[in-house]
Image (spheres, rainbow, N blue to C red):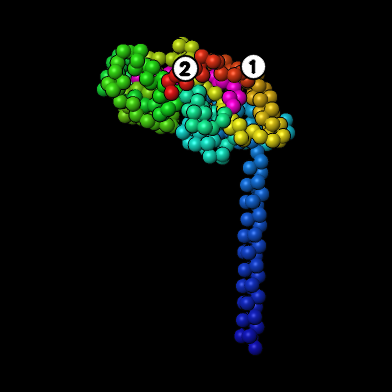
Amino acid sequence: MKKILCIIFACVLLASCSESFEEKQRISRAERIRLAKEDSAALKIGVLPTMDCLPLYVAKERRLFDTLGVDIRLKPYNSQIDCDAALLKGRLEGSVTDLVKGEGMKQKGTALRYATATSARWQFVANRLSRINELKQLTDKLVAMARFSATHLLAELCIDSARLKRDDVFLVQINDPNICLKMLQNNELDAMLLPEPQATSARLWKNPVLFDTEQRDIRLGVIAFREKGLQGKERSRQYAAFLKGYNAAVDSINRYGIQSYAPLVKKYMKVDEKTIRQLPKIKYTHIVAPREKDVLRAQKWL
């Protein structure tokens, strides 16, 4: 009799465990579906570990988008190519990118809207161990850039300005600026085009700067949105709130200074405190269309 009772108890216990597991699976599936729906409804923007993204990080961390009653989500990527690929596949509505990439996507049939130009700045940094002090010394050197992007255009601009043949310089595709920086530190590359804050780290290591887009008045950074991703009343409302929140973040950065947001720079851009303290003064601007001459420069190069 005891054996029969034990068997019955075991069967009830197993059934209970089975129902519990199935219930958890059902709840888990329902939760995943709910989260996927929320993410789909949100306005998603691809961001990078670079200083031109700081207004977006400030707006998100200070809940400037939330106070405007919209769900705007930042999706971090390590490289521009991955960020733009997600935009093209419809996983993002917007992306921090550059005019070369943007105009290239347009030429391939993707309708884009430039929400604003950004403060993106690139510097051509030479490896101090390569003993390159002038652009004309780049012959047979390895130069890092990302193909069909602002850094590709700028690399060729530097080569042309030194009156070198493009075949004389070896352009190497490195898409991640932090990997690029590590390769410079490990003496694996001779030169590269770096954004901030990576350029500041390179300067602190005594690597010379041979070219600066700010000094040449070249502004290629933009935030671009897919036109298809902005269709509908709710998307229009989210986009309008994004513009307003971005401007508010810019006002805050310009008022209090970059150093006031050092924890955000460290968190999202993975640089040390010494680099953050040495960052150049960056003047962020309100929402503004990219200049026609910069768009034409990108189109002509492509």
Question: Mark 1: which amino acid?
Answer: Arg
Q: Is residue 64 visible?
A: no
Q: Is residue 123 above or below residue 174?
A: above
Where residue 221 sits in the image (x, y, percent)? Answer: 52, 22
Within 10 Å of disc 2 (Cα), the crowding (few <14, some 14-19, many 20+) is some
Which tag, 2 or 1, sits closer to the chain's start? 1
Q: Is residue 60 visible?
A: yes
Tell me the element at label 1. helix
Residue occupying the point 63% across, 64% down: 22
- Tally of numbered discs: 2
Q: Which residues are magenta?
A: 113-126
Question: Mark 2: which amino acid?
Answer: Arg
Numbered badge on residue 264: none
Within 10 Å of disc 1 (Cα), the crowding (few <14, some 14-19, many 20+) is few
Where residue 248 sits in the image (x, y, percent)? Answer: 67, 22
Where residue 254 sits in the image (x, y, percent)? Answer: 62, 17
Residue beneath disc 2: 297
Residue occupying the point 69% across, 35% down: 232
- Confirm whether the magenta stretch covers residue 116: yes
Quarter of the rendering containing residue 39: top right
Residue beneath disc 1: 255
Q: Is residue 291 above or below residue 75?
A: above
